[in-house]
Image (cartoon, grey):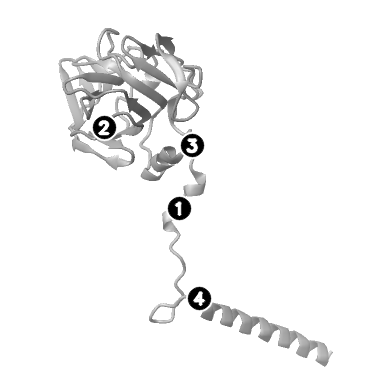
Amino acid sequence: MVKEDLTTVFIIISIFALVISLIALLPQDYNGLVNLPDLTQYENEDFIDLEHGLCLWLTFDNSPLDKSGYRLDGTLTNTTYQTGRFYKDISCDGNDWVEGTNNQLLDFVVNNFTITLWYKPYSISVGTGYMLYTRGKYNLDGMQFYTSGSSLLFTTSQAAATQISSSSGGLNNGTWNFLTIKRVGSSIRILNNLTDITNIAGNHINPLTSVRTWKIGVYDNKGDMWLNGEIDDVRIYNRLLTNYEIQKLYTLN
């Protein structure tokens, strides 16, 4: 019995000595406390759900169907599919667009939201505007996201009033641009390839509820601001995405 007790004590002492020696190998600060790695930067990264809050998701993989689950599907007019940023995209070269359904999910009257899309311009002309996304009409209701030359603009509208946010240039011709619109309270932030290029953040009043259909590549009247380029992977969220979530979308392949 005594021999077994001594063996147990010896094992406990050996384990304790091993733990002490392992702790000694860890980095120490000036007062001897162990410096553990800072893991706060990875907080929640393993739990990211890029479909959470997704109201409209258009991949244009030979189809204008909405993959968000809400089926706010689109209809193509004159547009063609071709090899895109991912699998397929749509190519617009004037007088072609995509039109979807009218749904209150895309109103965003009071809440923050995020819009992301890939855009490859065929040309950039000073004074020429191309519509990327619209569900509304200037000075009446809703919102619009469009280009003017190499600048990007976003508007929210009410009856006889419109607020505008814009970049000062920043759009790259002939190559893919990952564009992001973020509503943060009353201001709008505009990003291209993860860089905030906002020049005027604006002071946005809540947009008036719109009963219009969503459109890509043309103004609401379907007679102006025809897009000249390719668009891929359009996503609209009913929440503000974190910087890390936007980075994850940017690095998807």
For marks 3 and 2 on the same chain, the one whose residue lies earlier in the sequence: 2
- Residue 43: image tag: 1
* x then y, percent, for residue 64: 47, 16
Mark 2 lies on a secondary structure that is loop
Up the image or down, 129 lies above or below 111; here it is above
Q: Which is more N-terminal, label 3 or label 4?
A: 4
Mark 2 → mark 4, Cα distance in angstroms: 48 Å
Amino acid carrying label 4: it is: Leu
Foreground disc of the pair 2, 1:
2
Which corner quadrant of the image does residue 135 belong to?
top left
Please give the name of the residue rendered at 43% of the width and 81% of the height, measured from the top-left corner: 32
Q: State which tag comes first along the sequence, 4 or 1.
A: 4
Visible residue check, residue 185? no
Q: Please tell me in which quadrant of the rendered image residue 1 appears.
A: bottom right
Residue sitting farthest toward the right? 1
Task: Measure the C-alpha gap from mark 2 to mark 1.
Answer: 33 Å
- CA distance separating discs 3 and 2: 21 Å
Residue named by callout 2: 171
How far apart are the two marked residues, 4 and 3, measured between alpha carbons?
38 Å
Residue beneath disc 3: 253
Q: Amino acid at mark 3?
A: Asn
Residue shown at 57% from the left, 82% from the top = 21
Could you say whether the residue bearing mark 4 is in a helix, strand or loop? loop
- Residue type at the position of mark 1: Glu
What is the CA distance from the residue labelled 4 to the residue labelled 1? 23 Å
Q: Quadrant of residue 78?
A: top left
Looking at marks 2 and 4 on the same chain, the residue that comes earlier in the sequence is marked by 4
Decide: few, some or many residues near mark 1? Use Cα within 10 Å; few <14, some 14-19, many ≥20: few
Spot occupied by residue 75 in the image (x, y as percentages of width and height): 43, 11
Dot 3 surroundings within 10 Å: few (below 14), some, or many (20 or more)?
few
Circle 2: residue type: Leu
68 to 138, vertically: above or below:
below
